[in-house]
Amino acid sequence: MLVTLNQCVSELRVDLKAHQEIVLQLLLAILILACSRAGFAEPFLIVGTPEEPFKMETSESIQGIDVDVISEVMAQLGVEYDIQLIASGARIIREAQQGRIDMVLSFSFKEPRTDYLVYPEQSYKDVSWNFFYHEDNFGRFHYDQLSDLKGLKVGAVNAWAYTPEFWHAPFKIEEVSKHTLLLDMLLHKRIDLAPMNLVETRYRLKQRGLSNTLLYLPTPLISRPYFNAFVKFSKHPMMKRVQAGYDQIIRQMREDGRINEIYSAYLGEVPTRE
């Protein structure tokens, strides 16, 4: 049977029309999907460096004091978030300067950082360095100023920047290469005292069952607050909401004891805050 030219043209037109409808349907589906996703922002991205017991990565999750506090804050604000840990502080700063993250965890206040960070008013975290000692020496030491420790044997990590006055104080300094060695020296009573990070050391002692063996003097050698700061160049649509509610929630958590409960879960006690 011969097919006329008009029949071929007619069938071709029908075939093209069918394909056009399929293409239009696909484009419409893509457009609807894109529009629906536009209403959902990416999670609020929060980044920090690994630091026991504040933020620690396990095989299953990221845990720690900072993580638990942020979880409470974001739950109250109703904001979806994601926490990532990056070992390099310099890289975190670069990410913040480029506006690729939304919040940084545990930064001390430094004026140059205000170029790319907005600091909240509230801090729940003081990084303090206290003198630890063996329980057998309980009541032997008194410390308000470095001259009170005259003649004692004090452990210290090589070139560690405790305070400028520390290295010129009137006591004998026993230098080691890392802070874990100071714990062993204290346990064997080879030194009288050693300045160490209060919360980190208390956590490690609790893990080893030594919380009542190595004690610390209440007055810190040095102490300063650390903040969870907002990234100034973030474009996240929830940024204003987080900034507006953060300070109030942290203040409430401190007043009603929730901050203390979180610390206690990791340390067995609340760190001294003077």
Image (cartoon, rainbow, N blue to C red):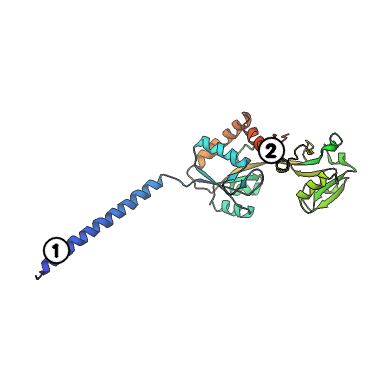
The residue closer to the viewer here, 247 or 9, is 9
Quarter of the image for residue 126 reads top right
Find the residue positioned furthest to the right.
151
Residue depicted at x 52% and y 37%: 75
Please indicate, yes or no, whether residue 165 appears anywhere in the rendered image. Answer: no
What amino acid does circle 1 point to?
Ser
Quarter of the image for residue 91 reads bottom right
Quick check: 235 above or below 16? Answer: above
Residue that label 2 marks? 267
Q: Residues within 10 Å of mark 2 (few under 14, many from 20)?
A: many
Residue depicted at x 85% and y 50%: 174
Q: Quadrant of the N terminus?
A: bottom left
Relative to residue 53, is residue 155 drawn left or right? right
The residue closer to the viewer here, 170 or 194, is 194
Report, in whole angstroms, how far the alpha carbon at label 2 lies from the one at label 1: 82 Å
SS for tag 1? helix
User: Of the residues under marks 2 and 1, which one precedes in the sequence?
Assistant: 1
Q: Nearer the viewer, mark 2 or mark 1?
A: 2
Asked whether the residues under the numbered discs 2 and 1 touch, taking CB atoms below 8 Å apart as contact, a structural biologist would say no
Residue that label 1 marks? 10
